[in-house]
Structure formats: C-alpha cells, structure tokens
Image: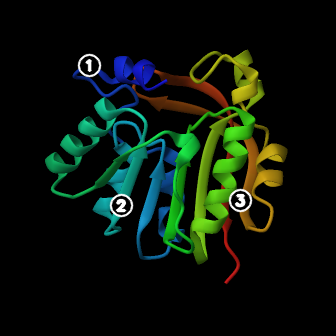
Amino acid sequence: MSRVWDQRYRTEAYAYGTAPNDFLASIADQIPRGPVLCVGEGEGRNAVFLAERGHAVTAIDWSPVGLAKAEQLAASRGVHLETVCADLAEVPFAPSAWSGIVEIFVHLPAPVRTALHEGVKKGLRPGGVLVVESYTPKQLEHGTGGPTDPELLPTIEDLRRELSGLDYVIAREIERDIHEGVLHDGWSAVAQVLARKPA
C-alpha cells in the first residue's frame, strides 16, 4: 500500500495542496492546547497548520515519501513535526496521550477503521477531541476525489457506531465544494465529525 502513496507523492507539487482542510481550519480553536496526532497525514498540510497554532504535532503515515515532504513543508514554515512511518492498521495508541487526533480523508477497510477508532478512543485525553472528515458512499456519484471502492467510504452512522462513547459536537453528512490540490476538486459528499472524550 505504501508504494501506491509513495508514487502519488513523488512529485514536486503537493497532491492535496499545502493549505489545511477547510473543516479542520473551521474548528481548530476547539482542539485543547497540547499534543496532537494527525493520522494518515501524507504530505503534512494539516499537521503543519496545527503546529503553526502552537500544538506539538506528530504526523503518522505509511508513506515515507509523503512524510519527507511533510518535514520539508514544516521547515519552510518554521515549525517542527514529529513524523512516524507506520502501517495505519498498527498505530500504537498510548492511553490518554493526545489533546487532539485528526483524521482527514483517511479511507480504510471497515475492520481496520474500526480498530483504529478503538485506539483513538483510548488515546484521547479526557476533554480531548477527534476531528474527522471523510467521503461518504454518495461521493461515488460525484467522482471529484477519494476512493472508488464503497467499502472505504463510511456513512455518518458507521462513524457514530465506531466512535460510541465520545460526545458529538458535530456529526453530519453534507455536500460541499472542496478544492484541495489536484486530487480533491469539486462538489463532494462528506461526513464530518467533531467529538470530545468525556472528562
């Protein structure tokens, strides 16, 4: 799997741009101060944005090529990232380690996603927040980005079930215009979650 993403990232341009995801930017002030984990972070646009806001950020991805570009982007912006190259099916979550966990367009098979979300719930500190944006099955009608395998596209009901035990501030399916590099471009169907671990 990492070879596919290495190939995608092996260009000078940033596949999804260098600006943060719009949804993340809109709710970033709700992430408590403290360390943040960005899962499936790729080339680092969201991690760098959060580091610029003063968070200690760890970016985890299975593509060393993407993470190298994330480090370059961070250096160009005068911030630091910790980067970890790992299979997303095997992300280690220390208990209560993170003030925020960010999962933007991370599309995984349902069993892997469910296991990841169990780790997320363990890894969040009490009061910590999870931020998710992902394409939904309706995105297949648009074809403006994301996987073509419906198994990789969760509904909001899927996410609510997997994240049970967190308190939802936002949990919705919407359609919106997305322009993130050349690979996410146009009218899109997404699920958005902002959830807080009970204190």
72 shown above or below 139:
below
Q: Is residue 72 left or right of residue 83?
A: left
Q: Nearer the viewer, mark 2 or mark 3?
A: 2
Question: Tag 2 or tag 1, which sits nearer the N-term?
Answer: 1
Residue 85 placement (x, y as % from top left): 37, 42
Q: Give residue 120's position: percent from left, percent from top.
A: 62, 59
Q: Is residue 109 visible?
A: yes
Question: In the rendered view, does 131 fall on the left or right side of 113?
Answer: left
Tell me which label, 2 or 3, sits earlier in the chain: 2
Q: Which residue is mark 1?
A: 11
The disc placed on residue 170 is 3
Evaluate whether residue 50 shows in this view.
no
Q: CA distance from mark 1 to mark 3?
A: 35 Å
Q: Which residue occupies 63% across, 58% down? A: 119
Q: Amino acid at mark 3?
A: Ile
Mark 2, other Cα within 10 Å: few <14 / some 14–19 / many ≥20: many
Residue type at numbered disc 1: Thr
What residue is disc 2 on?
57
Residue displayed at 20% across by 58% down: 79
In the picture, measured across the screen, residue 164 lies left or right of residue 27, that is right
Q: Nearer the viewer, residue 80 or 52?
A: 80
First-in-chain label (1 vs 3):
1
Which amino acid, mark 2?
Answer: Val
Relative to 30, does residue 26 appear above or below in the rendering?
Answer: above
What kind of element bears circle 1? loop
Q: Residue at x 83, y 52 (%)?
A: 161
- Residue 45 position, x and y percent, is 35, 43
Q: Is residue 31 left or right of residue 151?
A: left
Which picture quadrant has residue 63? top left
Viewer-proximal residue, 193 or 65?
65
